[in-house]
């Protein structure tokens, strides 16, 4: 099993000069990791690179010394090209969470509406672990283009929401308007990314709200059980005078 090049992600506050972080999909772990290769690709069209050989390096460890963040270093000589459809099939396993239909301008309130609709579609355990919306993959079958939501301006038509690996989301879309991903403009994309970053904030707010509600519900159940035990406890026998 090897690794597949996937579209890069933009983090406008990172220290990297072009603010792009390249990713690759590791087939063995079914997860995306930072890719330490020779290229960056905000948009892939038609085909992608597959590396049969690579090294998985630790980028960061936790307080106990256990690896918690990795990067993938490809062996360039082991590279071959594969159709993007093959990567989609491997990453999604042809599973779908559900479908949406409509037109969503990510620069307006429709963006938040789209985030809410996807959120409500997913199971609670999935919501807590998936990547933030701007990192979601966007697949346009009619044009054989794979990119990320961070580089998209507008979604339309039927949208199929699929898993991608263990923590990703892939949106299979019929109609898409891209920002500057296909005619790259770094500063224009940075401004666009900062503007649309509210979608990540909206997603995090939904997750936090659900977790708080679950915590309150758990506390109320626990408190109710304590009160019930107190009511069931036998009365104490007093001293005989």
Image (cartoon, rainbow, N blue to C red):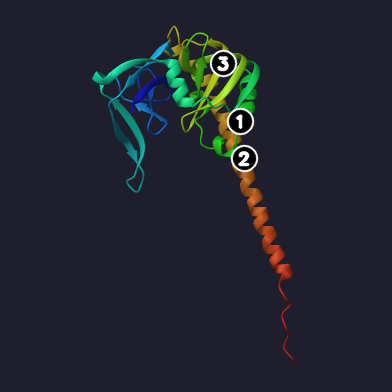
Residue 239 found in image quarter = bottom right
Residue 48 found in image quarter = top left
Going from N to C along the chain, the mark reached first, 1 or 3, is 1
Residue 226: give x, y in percent of width and height: 67, 63
Q: Residue at x 30, y 32 (%)?
A: 56
Give the Cα separation between the discs numbered 1 and 3: 17 Å
In the picture shown, does residue 66 fall above or below 179?
Answer: below
Residue 234: give x, y in percent of width and height: 72, 76
Give the Cα separation between the discs numbered 1 and 2: 11 Å
Q: Residue at x 36, y 44 (%)?
A: 62
In the picture shown, does residue 90 fall above or below 183?
Answer: below
Single out the residue that lies furthest toward the bottom.
241
**Circle 1: element type:** helix
Going from N to C along the chain, the mark reached first, 1 or 2, is 1
Compared across the picture, whether 123 is left or right of 54 comes to right
In the picture shown, does residue 94 fall above or below 183?
Answer: below
Label disc, if present, on residue 210 of the rendered structure: 2
Say few, some or many: other residues with alpha carbon within 10 Å of mark 1 (under 14 / 14 to 19 / 20 or more). some
Which residue carries the number 3 mark?
A: 173
Give the Cα separation between the discs numbered 2 and 3: 28 Å
Q: Nearer the viewer, mark 1 or mark 3?
A: 3
**Circle 3: element type:** strand
Single out the residue that lies furthest toward the top.
183
Residue 78: give x, y in percent of width and height: 26, 20
- Badge count: 3
Look at the image and tell me in which quarter the N terminus lies: top left
Compared across the picture, whether 154 is left or right of 63 comes to right
In the picture shown, does residue 221 fall above or below 102?
Answer: below
Q: Are marks 1 and 2 in contact (CB under 8 Å)?
A: no
Q: Are marks 1 and 3 in contact (CB under 8 Å)?
A: no
């Amino acid at each position: 099993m090897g690794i597949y090049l996937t579209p890069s992600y933009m983090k406008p506050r990172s220290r990297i000069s072009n603010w792009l972080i390249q990713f690759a999909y590791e087939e063995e772990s079914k997860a995306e990791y930072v890719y330490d290769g020779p290229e960056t690709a905000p948009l892939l069209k038609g085909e992608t690179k597959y590396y049969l050989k690579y090294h998985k390096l630790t980028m960061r460890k936790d307080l106990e010394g256990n690896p918690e963040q990795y990067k993938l270093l490809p062996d360039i000589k082991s590279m071959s090209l594969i159709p993007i459809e093959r990567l989609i099939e491997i990453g999604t396993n042809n599973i779908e969470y559900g479908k949406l239909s409509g037109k969503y301008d990510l620069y307006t309130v429709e963006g938040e509406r789209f985030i809410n609709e996807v959120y409500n579609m997913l199971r609670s355990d999935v919501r807590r672990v998936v990547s933030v919306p701007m990192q979601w993959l966007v697949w346009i079958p009619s044009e054989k283009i794979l990119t990320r939501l961070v580089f998209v301006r507008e979604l339309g038509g039927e949208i199929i929401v699929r898993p991608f690996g263990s923590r990703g989301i892939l949106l299979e879309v019929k109609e898409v308007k891209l920002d500057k991903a296909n005619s790259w403009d770094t500063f224009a994309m940075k401004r666009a990314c900062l503007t649309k970053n509210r979608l990540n904030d909206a997603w995090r707010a939904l997750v936090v709200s659900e977790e708080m509600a679950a915590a309150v519900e758990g506390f109320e159940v626990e408190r109710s059980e304590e009160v019930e035990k107190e009511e069931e406890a036998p009365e104490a026998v007093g001293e005989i005078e």
